[in-house]
Amino acid sequence: MSFFRLLIVDDHPIVLAGLKLLLRGDGRFDVCGEARSAQAACIEAERLQPDVIITDLIMGDGDGLALIEDLRAMLPAARIIVYSSRDETVWGPHVIYAGAHGYVAKSEPLETVAVALDRVMAGAIHVSEPVQQLLMGDLARRRDRRTEIGDLSGRELQVLRLIGSGATLQSLAKELGLSVKTVGTYRERLKIKLGLDSVRMLERHAADHVAGRLDPS
């Protein structure tokens, strides 16, 4: 039997207790850690290197979607399931595009998390039927369309703006509270998405077309 290390990210003690109780009877998973904030989640994920992460979307200290992207950049092989009270028809597609592998609404029975774990560990995506229909419709619209600046996520735009301002990997990492390795992953992803062949081309593109437009001031 395969054995997987699991990190739970949620700031509600009752949710943490319920998830641990659910997983206690499943010999495949070891809850190796807990985190109650986005910052703590990144620290624990880097320290513990979990195979699976169950996370809420509502973070008191950060954006849940940005957290998903950070976790994927940090641990590309890890499977991520969002367990949230937010409207799944609104947030479900955003969660999947951010890099999560499943979305379970907290209004669903707790056992649905176990179903989601089975599906994502088998290599599938777990979402409800309404979210699946939304994703299929959006995929049809996106097919064969070149990636544009407006298609990038909020975190990717943030990284791109900082690159355009001349920030080094070290200063980027400090600004975002991430490791240099994770920020480097974002930089490589941006090169691929925007069809650019080198870091220098990415820097020039960001400086010429992005930094001024995305300046929050």
Image (spheres, helix red, strand yellow):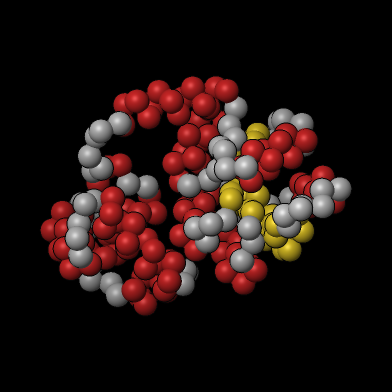
Can residue 84 be seen in this snapshot? no
Residue displayed at 37% across by 77% down: 170
For residue 177, above or below residue 80? below
Q: Is residue 150 left or right of residue 155?
A: left
Provide residue 179's location: percent of width, then percent of height.
46, 72
Q: Is residue 202 left or right of residue 154?
A: left
Residue 54 position, x and y percent, is 65, 49
Q: Is residue 8 above or below residue 122?
A: below
Q: Residue at left 13%, top 58%?
A: 208
Task: Answer with left or right where residue 42 lies relative to residue 99.
Answer: right
Estimate the x, y position of residue 112 in percent, counting from the top left.
72, 34
Identify the image quadrant of residue 174. Answer: bottom left
Which residue is at the front of the view, 32 or 216? 32
In this rendering, does residue 202 appear at all? Answer: yes
Residue 11 sits above or below residue 111 on the image: below
Q: Residue at x 44, y 41 (%)?
A: 97
Residue at screen point 64% across, 54% down: 52
Q: How many badges with numbers are in the image?
A: 0
Q: Which quadrant of the figure contains the C terminus? A: bottom left
Residue lying farthest front? 1
Residue 152 lies, in percent from the top left, at 32, 46
Q: Nearer the viewer, residue 57 or 23?
A: 23
